[in-house]
Image (cartoon, grey):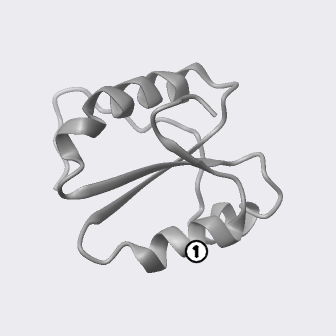
Amino acid sequence: MGSVVLTTLRQKRDVDAAICDTLDKVLLLRFGRTSHSACLQLDDVLAKSSWGITKFTTVALVDMDSEEIQVYVDYFDITLRRRFCPKRHYM
């Protein structure tokens, strides 16, 4: 995927294991593709900040091109569209 520093999950069982094994931290899963520049930019930001947030967060990249991962993509209705509204904050 986009980062050497962050773990990349390509199989459903790897994502399931990450969900089950992360008990004391927040699990941040970034679903995306290496062909999208926005995903690569986010990977760079996550890689740079991962050292500072490792005490409370586990970060992993999930390869959306994998057939097994499509279960999660469909279940969570994951799309790569950006939802951006300038000067608005969401709670």
Q: Residue furthest right?
A: 67
Secondary structure beneath disc 1?
helix
Q: Residue at x 70, y 53 (%)?
A: 10
- In depth, the one of 41 and 22 nearer the eye is 22
Q: Please give the residue where the numbered disc 1 appears in the rendered image.
A: 16
Residue 27, percent across and down?
Answer: 36, 62
Q: Is residue 82 above or below residue 54?
A: above
Q: Quadrant of residue 28?
A: bottom left
Q: Amino acid at mark 1?
A: Asp
Q: Is residue 40 above or below residue 85?
A: above
Q: Is residue 83 above or below residue 37?
A: below
Looking at the rendered image, the quarter that the C terminus falls into is bottom left
Q: Quadrant of residue 69?
A: bottom right
Q: Residue at x 65, y 60 (%)?
A: 73
- In depth, the one of 63 and 48 nearer the eye is 48
Q: Residue at x 55, y 38 (%)?
A: 81
Position of 78 compared to 18: left or right?
Answer: right
Residue 51, percent across and down?
Answer: 25, 37
Position of 69 compared to 77: left or right?
Answer: right
Position of 19 compared to 1: left or right?
Answer: left
Q: Quadrant of residue 89?
A: top left
Residue 15, percent across and down?
Answer: 58, 66
Q: Is residue 7 above or below residue 36?
A: below
